[in-house]
Image (cartoon, grey):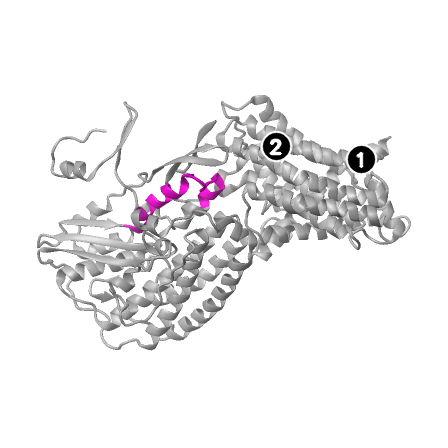
Amino acid sequence: MIWEILEAAIFPGALFILAVSLFYEWIDRKFYARLQNRVGPHLAGPFGILQPIADLIKLLSKENIVPAAADRFFFTFTPIMAPTLILLACMFLPIAGLSGLISFEGDLIVLIALLSIYTIIVYLAGEGSNNRLASIGATRAALQLIGYEIPLTLALLSAAISAGSLSVAGVLEAQIERGIWFIAGPQVIGFAIFVVAAQAEMERVPFDIPEAEQEIVAGWEVEYTGARLALFRLSKDLELFLLSGLGATVFLGGSAGPVISGLEPLLHAVYFILKSAVVLLIFSIVRAVFARLRIDQVISFSWRWLMPLAIILIILTEVLA
Amino acid sequence: MSFEIPIGPQHPIHVEPIMLRLKVEGELIVDVDVDVSYLHRGIEKGLEVRPYIQGLYLAERICGICNCAHSLCYCLNVEQLLGKEAPPRARYLRLIVEELSRMHSHLLWLGHYFHTLGFETLFMYFWRDRERVMDMLELITGNRVTTAYNTIGGVRRDLPQEAEAKLRRALDYLEERMKYYEKVVDGEPTILARTQGVGVLKSSEAISLGTVGPHLRASGIRHDVRLDDPYSGHDEVPFNVVTHDGCDCYARVKVRLGEVVESINMIRYALDHLPSGEYRLKIPPLFKAPEGESLARVEAPRGELVHYSISNGGTNPYRYKVRTPTLANIFSVVYMLKSRGDREVYIADVPPILGGIDPCICCTARVLVTDEARRKRRILTLTDLRKYSQGGRRVRG
C-alpha cells in the first residue's frame, strides 16, 4: 500500500511528472530561443535550467486579484481543476514501466476525454472572468476544439486499431511484440496529424488563437494573476509533458527498450524521457516556423485537410490490419 | 449580439497610445471608432518659442524612428526661408543617412509586423539584422537612434575614414538577407494566409482617403516625394519607386522589402559618387530669417512628411505646422477595418491592418476636448483653434 502511494506521489507519479514537465518547459524555451538566434533563459541555475521553477515561484508570490465582475466560483475552481485534470491524464502514461500507474482496457478513451474536458475548463475560466477579451478567447478555444478534437481522436484510434487494444499499455505492448514502432508504417500519417492537433490542443503557434497576444491581449487568461495564473502556466507545462509523452508512447515505442534487470524502472523512465523529448523538439520547431492562423482558417484547415487525412488513415489501418 | 472591444490605449500590439473602439458581432467587426489624442505634446507651439537652431533639436524629437526625416525636413524648411542650399557633399551625406534610417525603420516595421502575426522567429531575425544598420548609423553620425546629423546648412560631421568600407560590407550582408526574406515571405503559407486579401485598399480608395508613402505605393500608385520633388540629391541618385498592385497587407510587406533593397543600391551609388568639398555652410547660431513662408516635403519611411513655417523676420518661426504621414494614413485604417459587403474583417485582422500603415502615434496626436461633467467629447476644428488662438471665446467641449 505504502509503496503504491509513494509511486503515485513521487516516482513515477506527481512529483516526478511535475519536475520533468518544468524541465520540458526549459527545453522548449531554450530550443525555441536557439532557433530564433537568441540565448534563451540563462540566469537561474546552470544554463537557466531552473528558470521555469523561478517563474512559477515568482508568480505564486504575486498579488492575487479577483475582478469584482468575475464569477468567484469559476474563477477559483478552474485554475485548480486545470492542472489536476492534466496530472490525472499523465498517470495513464507508461513512464517507469510498460503500463501506466492507472491502466485498464479503454484508458485511451478516458485520456482523450480528459483532454476535451480541459478545453471546457479553459472555456469556463474565460467566461467566468467576465471580461470581453476573455470571453472572445474562451469562445475561440471552444471553436478550436471543434477543429482539432476529432482528427486527434482518429489519429490515436488508428494506432489502437492497429494494436487491437484500446489501452495505452496495449498499444505499447503491440509495438514491443512486433519489434517495430508505429511511426515506421502507415501510422506516420497519424503522427503528423497528432503533432498538428496537439499543437492546437496546447494553444501554441500557429494555433495560439485563444490567447493571441497581439489581438486579444491574453485571451481567456487575461484576468488571471498570481497563483491562479501560476496554476494555468503549470497546467500548460503538464500538457506539454502529457502530449509529448503520449506521442512518444503511441508512435515511438515510449518506455520500451533494452533493459538491465534491477534497473528496469529507471531505464524505462530514461527511454520515455528521451523519446518524448524528441516529440517535444518537433513541437518546438513547429512553433518557430509559422505565423498564427485565423480561427476560421483553422476550422476550415482541419475539416478540409486533417479530417479526410485521418479518415484515410483509419481505412488504411483497417485494410492493412 | 454586438459589443465593443477596446484596442488600446494600452495594448500589446502597440507601444503607443491609440484607441480603436471596435464594435464586433462575434469575430466580425461592424464598426470602428478611432481616437489618437492621448499624446498631445505641443511641439508645434514649442517650435514657435525657440530660436531656429534650438527648434532643430525639438523637431528631431517629434518621432524617434523617423527622427532623421524630421530634422531633414526642418532644415530644408529653414534653408528655404534663408534662401540657402546645403553644399553637394552635404546633400549626399544627408541622403546616405536618410536611406540608412529608412532601412532601419523598414526592418523594424517588418520585424514588428511579423510579431503582430505571431511569427516571433522572423521578428527576431529582422531585428538582429537591423542591428547592422544601427551600427552603421552610429559609425556615421555618432548616435544609434536620434542621429542629430542634419543641421541648418548641411550636416554636423563628415563621413569618417573607415566608414565607407564597413558600410559596404554591411550593405552586402543586408542584400543577401533581404533575398532570403523575400523567399521566406513568398513561400510561407501561414504568412500568405494572414496577409493576402486582408485589408484591401484599392487605388481609387487610397487616393480619395489621402494615404501616403509605402501604404499608397502598395495600392499600386507611383508616388514618392523623392521622385516628385527631389530634395536632397535624389535627382542625381537613380532609384526605382517600388510599387505593388496587390492593394493588401501582403503588398505592403513586399513594398517595404523592395524599398530596403532600393535603399541599399542608393547608398552604394551615393558612396561611389560622393562629391568632395564642404559638408556644411557657415551659419551663425542665432540668426533672423527673412519674412515669408516656406513648405518642405520629405519622404519619411512612413510616407510624405510636410513641415510648414511662417516667419515674421524674427529669430523664431512665427508659426510652425507639421503634418506627419500617420495622420494621413489613419483614415484608411478606419475604412479598412469596417466590414462592408463581401469584405469581411475579423478581430484577428486588426493587427495586420493597423500595423500595415506603420503607425506612429506620438507624432499624430490631435486636440480633443473632453467635458467630464457632461461626458461629451469633441474634436476641435480648424476654425475653433483659430478662434482660440486669437483669444476669442473660450472653447467649450
Q: Which amino acid does label 2 sit on?
A: Val
- Chain letter of the residue beneath label 2 in the structure image: A
Q: Nearer the viewer, residue A11 or A178?
A: A178
Determine whether, in the image, residue B204 is placed left or right of residue B119: left
Which image quadrant: the N terminus of chain A? top right
Q: Residue at x 24, y 71 (%)?
A: B279
Which residue matches tag 2?
Answer: A122
Magenta part of the chain: B324-351
- Kindly identify the amino acid type of the residue bearing the numbered disc 1: Asp
Work out whether mark 2 precedes mark 1 in sequence or the reverse, and give the earlier one. 1
In-image side of A257 versus A245 (left or right):
right
Judged from the image, the secondary structure of the residue bearing numbered disc 1 is: helix
Residue A50 location (% of width, % of height): 64, 46
Q: Mark 1: few, some, or many residues within 10 Å (few <14, many ≥20)?
A: many
Does the magenta-highlighted stretch encompass residue A12? Answer: no
Which residue is most to the front?
A: B341
Q: Name the residue under label 1.
A: A107
Residue at 84% x, 41% y is A169
